Image (tube, rainbow, N blue to C red):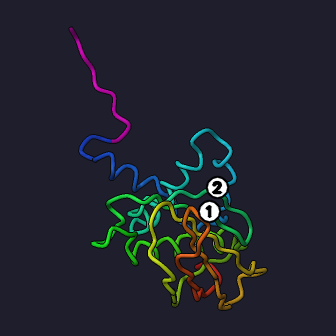
């Protein structure tokens, strides 16, 4: 029997290398986060694929495996499933996983809202842990929508709740918005 091999990536390159090259830059001429989410979220499996792509663009963020449930101007709802890889020694969700979730939700709410010619960076973050986090955690961020790429600081609040609707943590990202590099 004659066999053949079909490959989606060039010889000598791993699938991971090929995927990392396919991840576009956020510094392009359009708001890539908004464009990708708007195109993908209504498709079967689109939210999950978008969530994975976000994790590829920001690899550390991708380590928690959160799913973007809803995204619109000034708003993001992101969910983190409780599983062993995000737990601490007390069998609750690790504090750093919650920080990561807060940053993801806040960054997405702000990023989706940016004008095409703007970008941002988190300059600071504060978090308050209200109670042990167990079960599925949902992070919601509602933020002010930037109207230009003028250099400005925005406070981006995030509230994280458990499946019973109890607040387990609150965070505020201090984000600097400014123009994209030319």
- On-image quarter of the C terminus: bottom right
What label sits on residue 37 in the rendered view?
2
Up the image or down, 152 lies above or below 166; here it is below
Q: Tell me where residue 87 appears, x and y as whole percent.
A: 34, 67
Magenta: main secondary structure: loop
Q: Which residue is mark 1?
A: 33
Residue at the image point whose x is 70% and y is 78% from the top: 143
Q: Tell me where residue 164 appears, x and y as whole percent.
A: 59, 64
Taking the image as shown, residue 86 lies to the left or right of residue 156, namely: left
Closer to the camera in the image, 105 or 122? 105
- On-image quarter of the N terminus: top left
Residue at the image point whose x is 53% and y is 49% from the top: 48
Residue at the image point whose x is 54% and y is 66% from the top: 162
Closer to the camera in the image, 20 or 155? 155
Crowd class of label 1 (few under 14; some 14 to 19; many from 20; radius 10 Å): some
Closer to the camera in the image, 55 or 8? 55
Look at the numbered discs 2 and 1 and tell me whether their residues touch, using CB distance below 8 Å: yes
Taking the image as shown, residue 13 lies to the left or right of residue 141, namely: left
Q: Which residues are magenta?
A: 1-9
Cα distance between the residues tagged 2 and 1: 6 Å
Taking the image as shown, residue 159 lies to the left or right of residue 113, namely: left
Residue at the image point whose x is 67% and y is 90% from the top: 151
Residue 88 falls inside the magenta stretch: no
């Amino acid at each position: 029997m004659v066999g053949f091999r079909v490959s989606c990536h060039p010889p000598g390159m791993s699938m991971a290398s090929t995927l990392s090259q396919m991840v576009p830059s956020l510094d392009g001429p359009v708001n890539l986060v908004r464009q990708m989410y708007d195109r993908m979220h209504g498709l079967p499996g689109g939210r999950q694929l978008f969530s994975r792509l976000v994790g590829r663009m920001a690899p550390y963020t991708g380590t928690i495996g959160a799913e973007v449930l809803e995204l619109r101007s000034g708003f993001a709802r992101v969910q983190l499933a409780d599983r062993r890889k995000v737990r601490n020694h007390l069998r609750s969700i690790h504090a750093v996983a919650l920080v990561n979730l807060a940053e993801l939700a806040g960054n997405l709410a702000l990023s989706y809202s940016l004008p095409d010619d703007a970008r941002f960076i988190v300059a600071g973050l504060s978090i308050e842990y209200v109670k042990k986090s167990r079960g599925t955690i949902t992070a919601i961020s509602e933020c002010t929508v930037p109207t230009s790429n003028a250099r400005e600081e925005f406070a981006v609040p995030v509230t994280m709740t458990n499946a019973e609707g109890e607040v387990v943590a609150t965070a505020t990202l201090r984000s600097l918005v400014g123009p994209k590099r030319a």
